[in-house]
């Protein structure tokens, strides 16, 4: 499915349909118009038709379909190509990763999306409702707005991850979850952070290449916006060390709690054992079955012995309590 938005400062037009239905509109905007073509890559034939229409290099087409590729940038004579990852938090609080490719040329931008749903709704609203500078600027500014929307959602995703780590810490302190579940979630978050880092860190080098290798496509004023996006990326990269420390502290807290619980269990068992040691001694003494044990003949031997055992245990209990051993 294609979505084409043609716009300039005074008007805009949105067209949706298959390649056969709206293919004739491609790269035919009026003078002074910018064209944004959005397509999902689920229909390979449509993508290949679009690539042929814009004369995209076959390596570009391969990278569009190679959804496991890390962020990549390539500059050609008629366009430049950027493949990266788009992240967003869905309604269930889960992070959704999506491979997205952008092709930018004179007067047009093409976005190839892996799955339905994206982070560009604000950009669309700005075009449709004439907000901000999008309608007054050229295609290079649209490219920057799209890239900025993707990078901003990196920050939203990282903030979501930070809140998740803090909730794990709260649950661990309150004992609301089983410890094995906490460990599983900590390892899951750590794996997720490593994945996010592999997507964000390469963007630092890519943005430098975008600034230096796209001079014939980008207006010189665009560098200021690219510098701002670079600052966002640098700020987001600095989060990873903080998150690593937070997860390390969380593991240390878990290990400390586990150790304390084990110590409490061992202390309880030790106290119980200590209370029963003299009782075991007395029981063993009178269980030796010697024939000549004169105290066994006394009428009050049994109650006296039971009373002695109770008093001994009680005395030891009071002594341990006084020493604050428990």
Image (cartoon, helix red, strand yellow):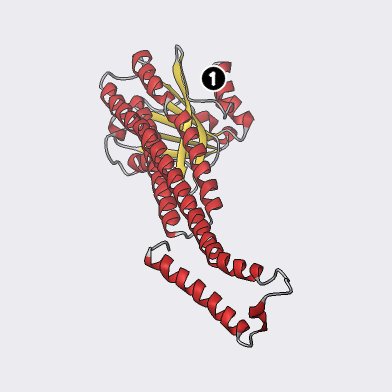
In the rendered image, the residue lying farthest to the top is 77
Looking at the image, residue 67 lies above or below residue 320: above
* Residue 29 showing in the rendered view: yes
Residue nearest the observer in this picture, 233 or 190: 190
Q: Which quarter of the figure is the C terminus placed in?
A: bottom left
Q: Which residue is mark 1?
A: 60
Where's residue 188, x and y in %? 53, 42
Instruction: Name which residue lies at 51% across and 54% down.
Output: 262
Query: Is residue 106 visible in the rendered structure shown here?
Result: no
In screen coordinates, is 68 left or right of 212? right
Q: Residues within 10 Å of mark 1 (few under 14, many from 20)?
A: many
Quarter of the rendering containing residue 138: top left
- Horizontal and vertical percent position of residue 53: 54, 22
Query: How many numbered discs?
Result: 1
Residue at the image position 40 percent from the left and 35 percent from the top:
150
Q: Percent position (x, y) of residue 148?
A: 35, 33
Q: Give whichever of 223, 17 is nearer the camera.
A: 223
At x 32% / y 44%, what residue is drawn? Answer: 129
Q: Is residue 9 left or right of residue 201?
A: left
Q: Which residue occupies the extreme bottom position in the image?
A: 299
The residue that appears at 37% across and 31% down in the rendered structure is 237
Residue closest to the eye, 100 or 311 = 311
Q: Position of residue 320 (x, y in %)?
A: 43, 65
Screen quadrant of the N terminus? top right
- Helix, strand or loop at label 1? It is helix
**Going by the image, does 254 lie left or right of 123?**
right
In depth, the one of 262 and 156 nearer the eye is 262
């Amino acid at each position: 499915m294609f979505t084409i938005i043609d716009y300039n400062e005074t008007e805009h037009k949105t067209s949706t349909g298959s390649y056969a239905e709206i293919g004739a509109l491609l790269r035919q905007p009026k003078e002074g118009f910018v064209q944004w073509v959005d397509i999902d890559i689920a229909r390979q034939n449509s993508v290949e038709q679009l690539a042929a229409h814009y004369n995209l290099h076959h390596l570009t087409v391969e990278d569009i379909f190679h959804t496991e590729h890390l962020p990549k940038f390539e500059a050609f004579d008629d366009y430049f190509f950027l493949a990266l990852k788009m992240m967003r938090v869905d309604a269930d609080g889960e992070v959704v990763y999506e491979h997205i490719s952008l092709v930018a040329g004179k007067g047009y931008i093409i976005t190839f999306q892996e799955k339905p749903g994206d982070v560009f709704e604000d950009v669309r609203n700005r075009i449709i409702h004439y907000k901000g500078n999008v309608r007054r600027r050229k295609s290079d500014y649209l490219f920057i707005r799209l890239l900025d929307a993707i990078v901003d959602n990196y920050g939203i995703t990282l903030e979501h991850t930070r809140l998740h780590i803090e909730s794990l810490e709260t649950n661990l302190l309150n004992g609301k979850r089983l410890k094995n579940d906490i460990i599983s979630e900590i390892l899951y978050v750590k794996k997720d952070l490593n994945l996010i880092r592999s997507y964000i860190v390469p963007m630092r080098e890519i943005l430098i290449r975008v600034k230096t290798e796209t001079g014939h496509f980008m207006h010189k004023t665009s560098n200021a916006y690219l510098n701002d996006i670079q600052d966002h990326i640098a700020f987001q990269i600095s989060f990873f060390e903080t998150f690593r420390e937070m997860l390390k502290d969380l593991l240390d807290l878990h290990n400390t709690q586990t150790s304390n619980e084990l110590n409490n269990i061992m202390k309880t068992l030790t106290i119980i054992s200590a209370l029963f040691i003299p009782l075991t001694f007395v029981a063993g003494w009178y269980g030796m079955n010697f024939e000549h044990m004169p105290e066994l003949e006394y009428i009050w031997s049994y109650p006296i012995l039971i009373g002695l055992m109770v008093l001994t245990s009680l005395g030891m209990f009071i002594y341990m309590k006084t020493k604050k051993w428990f």
